[in-house]
Image (cartoon, rainbow, N blue to C red):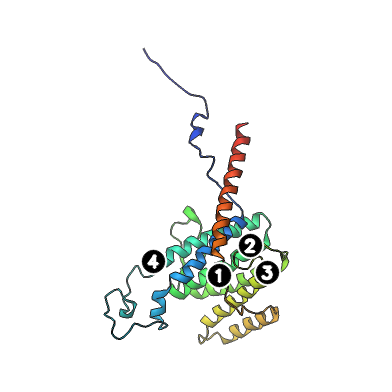
């Protein structure tokens, strides 16, 4: 004698968590992305300060093999920074792509500026890094390394695009912008400051004509550069992150109810 049992289609739908968000909006991702960047900038570069000579140990300090002053460099040099920056870049790439889909030029511009900020630091530390093939998930598991010079040139171009986007976006207060509060002019100044920094990295490399031309473009743009530190309100970011979580959960639950009706 044989017996069989079955269940109706959709029985295992109970294993789908309705509270897990599958997508969100740029204004909900930006605060945490900026907070992560700001926190890393404050806490993660002490070893480079030693290598660059900004810091020095006392003459009476007993060295060990892990001190920056020994100039010990292994295959895991900067590994934590590498992983943290690329993880952060995934957030900014998501903001950029979602902003394009949702026609939000301010967030697209902000994402491009922060991507330039992150990639410039990667190139400064490591030289050639994954760029053209980076941030494509499982479709490109082993991205090729792009030449550092090509990355600098691409970042200069992208910063120009970001400035144009900021100029076409309404200049209004934005709760999700914990860096400048939606002040387009400040974002443009940050972009120009990054453009100048990238050009300085290329000085005395036989690119004087190119650099002078790019500086002329920055001056012609006319907004100028940052004249004060850009400081992120991390406390506001945590509050925005909680709001984002609740909003995403509410949206997911609403979608689930619609599907079940």
Badge 1 local density, few (<14 within 10 Å), some, or many (20+)? many
Q: CA distance from mark 4 to mark 3?
A: 34 Å
Question: N-terminal of the two: label 2 or label 4?
Answer: 4
Q: Residue 54 at what x, y percent from top left?
A: 42, 83
Whole-angstrom CA distance, mark 2 to mark 4, is 29 Å
Determine whether the residue tagged by mark 2 lies in a helix, strand or loop. helix
Q: Give the crowd class for mark 3: few <14, some 14-19, many >=20 residues within 10 Å.
A: many
N-term mark: 2 or 1: 2
Q: Which residue is mark 1?
A: 116
**How far is disc 2 from disc 1 in space, using C-alphas?**
12 Å
Give the position of the N terminus as an image quadrant. Answer: top left
Residue at the location (56% across, 74% down)?
A: 153
User: Which is more N-terminal, label 3 or label 1?
Assistant: 1
Q: Secondary structure at mark 4?
A: helix
Answer yes or no: is residue 133 visible: no
Do the numbered discs 2 and 1 sit on residues whose CB atoms are within 8 Å? no
Q: Give the number of the disc on residue 184.
A: 3
CB contact under 8 Å: marks 3 and 2: no
The residue that label 2 is drawn on is 108
Query: Element type at marker 1?
Result: helix
Q: Choose mark 4 or mark 3, whichever is in front.
A: 3
Going from N to C along the chain, the mark reached first, 1 or 4, is: 4
- Depth check, front residue: 106 or 126: 106
Closer to viewer: mark 3 or mark 2? 3
Which residue is under mark 4? 79
- Circle 2 packing at 10 Å, graded few (<14), some (14-19), many (20+), is many
Q: Indicate left or right for 194 with 221 as reference.
A: left
Residue lying at the far top in this picture: please name it. 1
């Amino acid at each position: 004698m044989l017996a069989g049992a079955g269940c109706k289609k959709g029985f295992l739908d109970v294993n789908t968590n309705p509270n897990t968000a599958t997508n969100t909006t740029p204004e909900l991702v930006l605060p945490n992305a900026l907070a992560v960047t700001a926190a890393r900038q404050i806490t993660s570069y002490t070893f480079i300060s030693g290598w660059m000579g900004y810091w020095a140990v006392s003459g009476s300090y007993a060295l060990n093999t892990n001190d920056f002053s020994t100039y010990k460099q292994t295959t895991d040099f900067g590994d934590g920074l590498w992983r943290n920056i690329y993880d952060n870049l995934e957030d900014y790439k998501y903001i950029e792509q979602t902003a394009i889909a949702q026609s939000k030029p301010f967030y697209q511009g902000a994402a491009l500026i922060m991507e330039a900020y992150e990639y410039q630091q990667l190139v400064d530390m490591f030289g050639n890094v994954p760029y053209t093939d980076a941030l494509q998930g499982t479709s490109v598991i082993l991205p090729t390394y792009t030449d550092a010079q090509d990355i600098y040139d691409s970042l200069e171009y992208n910063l120009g695009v970001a400035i144009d986007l900021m100029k076409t976006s309404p200049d209004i207060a934005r709760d999700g912008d914990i860096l400048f509060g939606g002040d387009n002019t400040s974002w443009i100044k940050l972009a120009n400051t990054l453009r100048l920094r990238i050009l300085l990295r290329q000085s005395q490399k036989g690119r004087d004509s190119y650099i002078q031309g790019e500086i002329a473009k920055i001056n012609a743009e006319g907004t100028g550069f940052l004249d004060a530190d850009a400081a992120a309100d991390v406390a506001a970011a945590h509050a925005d992150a909680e709001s984002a979580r609740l909003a995403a959960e509410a949206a997911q639950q609403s979608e689930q109810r619609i599907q079940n009706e």
